[in-house]
Image (spheres, rainbow, N blue to C red):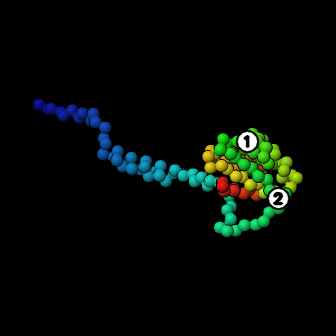
Amino acid sequence: MNLKRRIRASEEIPTCSMADIAFLLIIFFLVTTTMSMDRGLGLQLPALGQGKKVPKKNLCHIWINASNDVAIGGEVIPIGEIENIIRQKLEENSRLIISVKTDREAKYKTMIDVLDELKLAEAPRISLASPD
């Protein structure tokens, strides 16, 4: 009798190299992933105790009160109009310094929106005044 053994195909999935494949995928994603580093606001802050006298004609005050209203020179305006007003003031006086003063109770988002509008207006000199 000539009995031949049947060769059966394995019904299992070979998992001996799964750990190697997973390790290689982890290494691949670690090497190719880039992390974006937000730089925040691009402001240059003066050294402590450093101050200068500035003529009042070269100052423009922007106040943000506790109810998030924005006022330029005592007149309450919408945030969307800041860019146009500041551009006009910068055309009249190129040495203008914009002083932004925020109430402690005001939302941080309002201050950032005002700073964004000043950036759109291409204001070169911005001063952040501390709330009293």
Q: Are marks 1 and 2 in contact (CB under 8 Å)?
A: no
Kindly indicate the quadrant of the structure image that contains residue 70: top right
Check the image and name the residue furthest to the front: 132
Q: Is 74 positioned to the left or the right of 27 in the image? A: right
Residue at the image point whose x is 81% and y is 44% from the top: 84
Residue 83 seen by the camera: no
Instruction: Look at the picture and state if 47 lies above or below 32.
Output: below
Q: Which mark is residue 79?
A: 1
Residue at the image point whose x is 82% and y is 62% from the top: 55
Q: In whole angstroms, how far apart are the C-alphas of marks 1 and 2?
A: 24 Å
Q: Name which of mark 1 and mark 2 comes first in the sequence.
A: 2
Q: Would you call the spot at circle 2 few (<14 residues within 10 Å), some (14-19), or many (20 or more)?
A: few
Residue at the image point whose x is 70% and y is 52% from the top: 101
* Position of the C terminus by quadrant: bottom right
Amino acid type, label 1: Ile
Q: Is 86 positioned to the left or the right of 30 in the image? A: right
Q: Would you call the spot at circle 1 few (<14 residues within 10 Å), some (14-19), or many (20 or more)?
A: some
Check the image and name the residue furthest to the right: 92
Q: Which mark is residue 95?
A: none
Q: Position of residue 76 (x, y in %)?
A: 76, 42
Q: Which residue is more in the foreground, 35 or 66?
A: 66
The residue tagged 2 is 56
Q: Position of residue 41 (x, y in %)?
A: 65, 54
* Position of the N terminus by quadrant: top left
Helix, strand or loop status at disc 1:
helix
Q: Position of residue 15 (x, y in %)?
A: 31, 42
